[in-house]
Image (cartoon, rainbow, N blue to C red):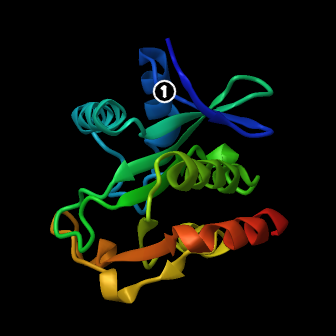
Amino acid sequence: MAEVATETDRLRLRTWDDADKVEFARVTNTPAVMRWLGGVQSDEWLAAGFERIDGYQRDFGHTLWAVERKADGALLGFCGLKRVNSPGASCPGDFEVGWRLREDAWGQGFAKEAAIASLDLAFDHFAAPHVVALTVEGNASSRGLMARLGMTRRADLDFTDDRFGPEMNPTIVYRIDAAEWPDARRRALQK
């Protein structure tokens, strides 16, 4: 049975069940959603990803939770917290906030709403000293959200992930410290 990690006005962030995983693959393993994430992936790749997601919850008490819209119970994607584990990462083990939403959920503020809730948990419940977010230069939407969340671009933390070619490198890093979050949160809620 799924456990709720947190709720917002419109969303529920919760653990996964098997039916969620099938639906998540159906609505997010698409060319548009996976554009900056290595492209559409195999069933084996998706299964390995869910093993990692389940492992984060087990090992750390947080994960990339299922994002469910309260109004109709639709699975919109995921958002939450993991620990940086990308090959070549400059900040391994740091708290990382991440999101991936289905295309028909874009542009409605769901990613921001879920990310704010995740950052609240990172700082208030898990006592993270700081949180990073990772993307690539071409992913303007994610970079924009990172900036709206008050995260600062940290070029000194960028790194090359050898799993990907030049279009997906370098991985660029944004970061926010716990002390910055209260003011950044207020500003993010006003945007």
Asked whether residue 144 appears in the rendered view, the answer is no
Residue 159: horizontal and vertical position, in percent?
Answer: 25, 78
Residue 7: horizontal and vertical position, in percent?
Answer: 69, 35
Residue 88: horizontal and vertical position, in percent?
Answer: 17, 70
Q: How many marks?
A: 1
Q: Which residue is drawn at 71% across and 36% down?
A: 11
Q: Which residue is drawn at 45% across and 18% down?
A: 17
The residue that label 1 is drawn on is: 15
Residue in front for this viewpoint, 57 or 137: 57
Q: In this view, does 180 lie above or below 13?
A: below
The C terminus - image quarter? bottom right
Residue in front for this viewpoint, 123 or 30: 123
Residue 30: horizontal and vertical position, in percent?
Answer: 46, 45
Q: Is residue 96 above or below residue 187?
A: above
What is the quadrant of residue 136 in the picture?
bottom left
Q: Which residue lies furthest to the top in this view?
A: 1
Q: In this view, does 45 lie above or below 134?
A: above
